[in-house]
Image (cartoon, grey):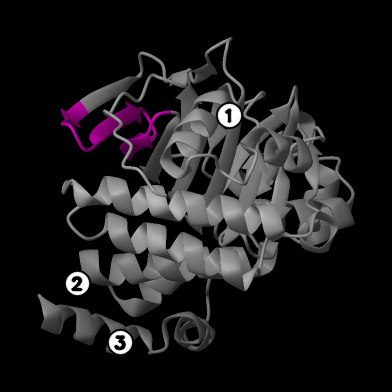
Amino acid sequence: MHRKVQGDVNEYDIADLGKNVKTMVKNENCSVLMLSDSTGEGVMTVYQVMPGVMICFSDMHMEKCDSEFELRKDKRVFCIDHCREGRIEMEVKPRVFSIMQENELRLDNRENHKGTSYYPLRHYHGVSVFMDVDETQRALDEMFDGFSVSVAELRQRYCNQEKPYAIRNDEGLKRIISSFYQRNMQRPEVSEAKEYYQIKVVEMLLYLEAMTVENTRESRPYYYKTQMEKIKAVHEKITGDLKTRWTIEELSSMYDIPATTMKKCFKDVYGDSIYSYQKRYRMNLAASMLIQDENKEIQEIAAQVGYENPGKFSVAFRSIMGVSPAEYRVRKEGIK
């Protein structure tokens, strides 16, 4: 038997989010929170769908977030995170970092989630389901006159190591997570959202209960703080000096990091190889310049992004944007 369980929106039931998070909108169905700093801003839409369960949709457009998030000391948390777009870099234990990539789902106990989170692409869109283990179990037992899944046992099964449990390419989980985003985009303020998310949380828990742990765990690399600092320095170098074409060997020597490690870490953090990332960065910058300064010659723009030969620039631009620089400028001008 299913019973309706009410839950008022109180985003502080499970954790203290910190004084750098400001509440912009709050009603009986959801809260909209704003976080900002010198690198940009982010918006979080929070639903508390039942006692002990909080769903948070994050849309971050910033380089980093100096989080003051801290679990309440009396809480055991089981958290499900999903990255829909972008990337997020989190400290999983002191001075050790992990990158959550696009379309990746993670199960975590949040014990190390305090400090600074980085968004290497300056964009992150995702959802997190926070569950207070004890309170969630009580609510589910009340809803179903006894719920067949133990939230505490799920937490133990998936969070029994120092590293978060990562999953990719599981079609069942993709379908469930996709339904979270679809509902959030359809008038998130309506009261029916609460009951909808209750059903989806139950579906997620039942699916995780039936899932085989070892068949779904994905091995993810972890990097030390010194490695991350070097990779960010490499990124700053290749995006700050577009006229110089640094070789892998030169960058490896410059930042005292093995070439293989550097290439792998860079791709994990920024989602592309060093060469491809720099090429895409150059073309995106050139595209912006084509629109912003209509009087600037294409040859001049090519030189500014590191191409002395306009023909080679045109070929590179087309490979990224699908059209030539001249065609791109004409199309964008026609849209204005």
Compared across the picture, whether 263 is left or right of 174 comes to: right
Q: Secondary structure at mark 3?
A: helix
Q: Which residue is mark 2?
A: 295
Q: Secondary structure at mark 1?
A: helix
- Magenta stretch containing residue 5, yes or no? no
Compared across the picture, whether 248 is left or right of 22 comes to: right
First in sequence: mark 3 vs mark 1: 1
Q: Which residue is mark 1?
A: 133
Q: Are marks 2 and 3 in contact (CB under 8 Å)?
A: no
Q: Are marks 3 and 1 in contact (CB under 8 Å)?
A: no
Dominant secondary structure (helix, strand or loop) of the stretch shown in magenta = strand
First in sequence: mark 2 vs mark 3: 2
Can you see residue 270?
no
At label 2, counting other C-alpha atoms closer than 10 Å, the crowd grade (few under 14, some 14-19, many 20 or more) is: few
Q: Is residue 7 above or below residue 232?
A: above
Residue type of the residue flagged with mark 1: Val
Residue type of the residue flagged with mark 3: Ala
Where is residue 198? Give x, y as percent: 39, 47
